[in-house]
Amino acid sequence: MDNRPIGIFDSGLGGLTVLSEIIKNSPNESVVYFGDCGRTPYGNKSKDTVIKYAFQDIRFLLNQDIKSIVIACNTVSAYSLSYVKKEFNSIHILEVIGPGSKAAVEATKNKKIGVIGTNATISSGVYENAIRELDNSTEVYSKACPLFVPLVEEGWWNNEITYRTAQEYLLSLKEKEIDTLVLGCTHYPLIKDTIQKVVGENVKLVSSATEISKMINKIILDDNLTRDEKIQPVYRYYTTDSVEKFEELGSKILGHSIFSVEKVDIEKY
Ligand code: DGL
């Protein structure tokens, strides 16, 4: 048994889609969530910058007495996983790309998988490599969708501009006759209805957020890290930008009101 919280971080609010799944799958767990909204998006930054940000974000979470870390950001996983695992080797670090790739390979029938993500995630080729390692007869078609993150952070989940943007990005993938599409960015589940409308009902959407939460639940059980069920779980939220904006959009994402978000000066870490 381990009553300490799980630490989760993302470049902004997208990682709350992972938290939302964790609340469903592991309702006894306490969580410390850190969203680097002041420096989002990470997906257009250089690899060095993303690694620097990831180290700072993890140092902040390690200060919160957590039992494990979830990188709820594909961009951070794509650019910095090997570096952070080497630097912070005394704590269990989980990421989103492995579970998302596995779920896509299991879901596809015609072995044509689409992957969408930030510029960083797509240019790193991590999903293609992970999927081909699992099944090298699979065709993988990738597309960077850099405007999706700002649209999501703006709260524009279902409007005409988001729909048009999705058409612009996704119609070429649809032409490849993919039957599975990996939402390779934790922000994207928030616009999944728009994405589904564009690619059509026959394409199965795989969310890296859902897949990682299933894995977390399994690891917590297997490693005997569960919390005492008699103690109420506690959720703490930290941001590097406006607390009010985090509370407003965060409440919308989680489907319940969140209060007492605290602002962090991440440059101290
Ligand atoms: N949620 C992050 C991801 O999964 C968004 C990255 C960004 O900030 O551009 O990649």
Image (tube, rainbow, N blue to C red):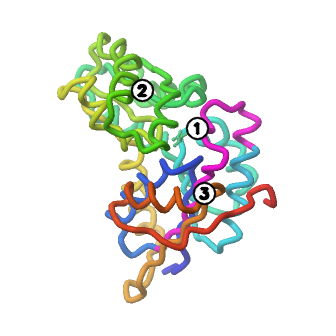
Q: Residue at x 18, y 28 (%)?
A: 201
Name the quadrant of the C terminus.
Answer: bottom right
- Crowd class of label 2 (few under 14; some 14 to 19; many from 20; radius 10 Å): many
Q: Is residue 91 above or below residue 193?
A: below
| Mark 1 CB within 8 Å of ligand 1 | yes
Q: Amino acid at mark 3?
A: Ser
Examine the image and state in which quarter residue 252 appears: bottom left
Which of the pair 252/106 is nearer the observer? 252
| Residue at mark 1 | 75
Asked which secondary structure carries label 3, the reply is: loop
| Residue 156: image location, x then y, percent | 40, 39
Boundaries of the magenta span = 30-51
| Residue at mark 3 | 242
Q: Amino acid at mark 1?
A: Thr
Q: Residue at x 38, y 38 (%)?
A: 102
| Residue at mark 2 | 115
Give the number of marks. Answer: 3
